[in-house]
Amino acid sequence: SRSARAVIRVRFPDGLLLQGTFGVREPVSALYEMVSGALREPWREFSLARPAGTVQRGQSLRLADFQETIQDAGLVPTAVISFQHTEDFDRGQPPYLTAELMEQVHNLESHVP
């Protein structure tokens, strides 16, 4: 069924959005793996947080349970979540994404009429 997939966008502090599609039964760890693989500095600790308006009672904003499914995390059918570095003193600087991805962003922007 169509609802078996979730489209998730990750918003970075510089405003860029990284989009991925996941099976609803995939674990939250798959989302962290996608983001980590896109980062220019993947060694810096980061966390992902769900939008404040979507948090169920007893849930934290931070997506901290890596075993939780995308569905149980409330990210179906679509969600925009926030990227943040965990350590204030160890914040990376933009660009957050790899050079290859930034090149694609640049190419997209230059095709916008």
Image (spheres, rainbow, N blue to C red):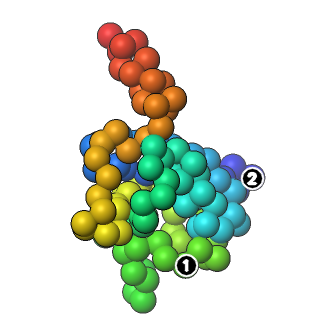
Element carrying mark 1: loop
Residue at the (46%, 31%) spot, across then down? 99
* Residue 46 in the figure: left or right of residue 75: left
Q: Earlier in the sequence, mark 2 or mark 1?
A: 2
Tally of marks: 2
Kindly identify the amino acid type of the residue bearing the numbered disc 2: Ser
| Labels 2 & 1 near each other (Cβ < 8 A) | no
Examine the image and state in which quarter residue 107 appears: top left
In the image, 109: left or right of 20? left
Cα distance between the residues tagged 2 and 1? 26 Å
Q: Amino acid at mark 1?
A: Asp
The circle on residue 33 is none
Q: Tell me the crowding category of disc 1: few under 14, some 14 to 19, or many 20 or more residues within 10 angstroms, Cα based.
A: few
Point 65% across, 68% down: residue: 27
Which residue does the image show at 49% across and 76% down from the upper left?
Answer: 64
Say what secondary structure mark 2 lies in.
loop
In this view, the residue in front, 61 or 12, is: 12
For residue 52, which quarter of the picture?
bottom left
Residue 67 makes an appearance in the image: yes
Quadrant of res 14: top left
- Asked whether the viewer can see residue 6, the reply is no
Q: Is residue 25 left or right of residue 108?
A: right
List the residue tagged with mark 1: 65
Residue topped by disc 2: 1
